[in-house]
Amino acid sequence: MQLRVKRPGMSWETAGLNGILALRSFVLADRWHLAWPSFAANFRQKVRAA
């Protein structure tokens, strides 16, 4: 992961990098199914038919 985030021209803000590392850790620990509902709830919106 270190090689991936330190490529030439890459720029990461601390919050963004911490978020990516947290998501990656859930995937590698096979706990994504536990994290996804909470993560998705932050971005879910109701949609109305036009």
Image (cartoon, rainbow, N blue to C red):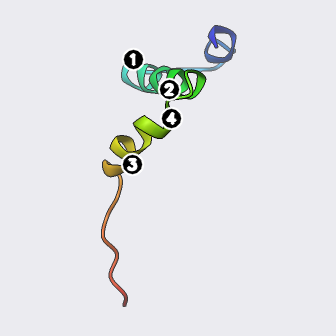
Foreground: disc 3 or disc 2 = 2
Q: CA distance from mark 4 to mark 2?
A: 5 Å
Residue on which the image places disc 3: 40
Label 3 CA crowd tier, 10 Å (few <14, some 14–19, many 20+)? few
Residue 39 as seen in the image, left or right of residue 3: left
Where is residue 11 shown, x and y percent of the image?
A: 54, 20
Residue on which the image places disc 2: 26
Q: CA distance from mark 1 to mark 3?
A: 21 Å
Where is residue 30 shown, x and y percent of the image?
A: 56, 28
| Image position of 46 with respect to 40: above or below | below
Residue 35 as seen in the image, left or right of residue 21: left
* Of 10 and 48, the residue lying toward us: 48
* SS class, disc 4: helix
Q: Residue at x 32, y 82 (%)?
A: 48
Do the residues under discs 1 and 4 have CB atoms within 8 angstroms?
A: no
Q: Residue at x 63, y 9 (%)?
A: 2
Image quadrant occupied by the C terminus: bottom left
Image quadrant occupied by the N terminus: top right
* SS class, disc 3: helix
| Earlier sequence position, callout 2 versus callout 1 | 1
| Image position of 38 with respect to 20: above or below | below
Q: CA distance from mark 3 to mark 4?
A: 11 Å
Q: Amino acid at mark 2?
A: Phe
Residue 42 as seen in the image, left or right of residue 7: left
Q: Quadrant of residue 4?
A: top right
Residue on which the image places disc 4: 32
Q: Amino acid at mark 4?
A: Trp
Residue on which the image places disc 1: 14
* Of 50 and 30, the residue lying toward us: 30
| Earlier sequence position, callout 1 versus callout 4 | 1
